[in-house]
Image (cartoon, grey):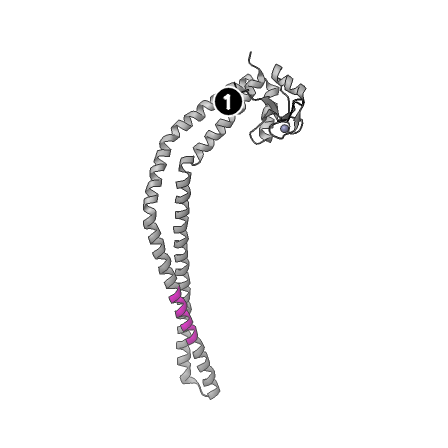
Amino acid sequence: MTRHLDTIVELQDTLTRLAAARARLSGIPDWMQELHGEHAAERAAIEALEAAAEQSRLERREAEAAIADAQEKLQRYQQQINAVTTTREYGALLQEIDHVKAQIRTGEEQGLAALERQDEARRAAEEKRQAFRDLDERYARELTRWEAEKPAVAAEIGSLEARVAELRGRVPRPHLVLFERLLGRMGGAALAPVRLLETPGRGPQVWHCGACNYRVRPQAVVEIRNRGSLVQCESCKRILYLEEEPA
Ligand SMILES: [Zn+2]
């Protein structure tokens, strides 16, 4: 007769494998991680350069608008000069004219600097795009390969799900309720192995919980071993089990 503890141990193991398979299906497989990282970094670098080019373009446009504004003022002041009647007014107007001329010069300098930055960012982005092409093709090939592997992973998930349902059906309801409550509370790992503490010399055997290290009473170990009893760790409350001894 199968002991319930053994069924629960298998259920936990199957659930862990199921979670791993699901993560694999929705994520990037290990063999693709490196290329995926490189691809994402290069793409981000290109996007950053494109954003910098766009920013410079906007700055150039702002400088041009400021220039147009100043030129309009300059024209107005130059027209007013004919209507001036006093030297004081004349002097004040000349000062304004100098001021807007300085604004135009500044705008031109800023516009030119922005244009240079824009050109540089565009050139750098283009260079990177050229270099990216190879990487992108390699990435597309690996993606295709990964897509081809996905059905097998999906099938594995399907059979693991079926196994989980079967095992769940075999565990008595109160045990299952306890197990699933712990599963939720412990982030997917409701069980902990009982481990023998390495003791120097020939002292009495000391057991502890493999998850939290809390001591496990020898009597509990006997109950687990002989009867497959469900014993919880007194500290972390996980259900304790004995790992199979290596043959
Ligand atoms: Zn524990």
**Residue at 60% in and 20% down:** 175
Q: Which residues are magenta?
A: 101-113
Residue 195 occupies quadrant: top right
**Residue at 54% in and 18% down:** 169
Is 191 drawn above or below residue 46 in the view shown? above
On the image, the x and y values in percent for residue 162 come to: 47, 21
Q: Main secondary structure of the magenta part?
A: helix
On the image, the x and y values in percent for residue 12 come to: 54, 24
For ligand 1, which image quadrant applies?
top right
Residue 118 occupies quadrant: bottom left
Label 1 CA crowd tier, 10 Å (few <14, some 14–19, many 20+): some
Q: Amino acid at mark 1?
A: Val
Circle 1 is placed at which residue position?
164
| Numbered marks: total | 1
Q: Nearer the viewer, residue 15 or 76?
A: 15
**Residue at 40% in and 69% down:** 109
Q: Is the residue indicated by label 1 positioned so its CB lies within 8 Å of ligand 1?
A: no
Is 89 drawn above or below residue 27 in the view shown? below
Is 84 drawn above or below residue 104 in the view shown? below
Left or right for 231, reference 6:
right
On the image, the x and y values in percent for residue 187 come to: 57, 32
Based on the picture, tell me whether residue 103 belongs to the magenta stretch: yes
On the image, the x and y values in percent for residue 131 come to: 33, 49
Q: Nearer the viewer, residue 149 or 219?
A: 219
Residue 49 occupies quadrant: bottom left
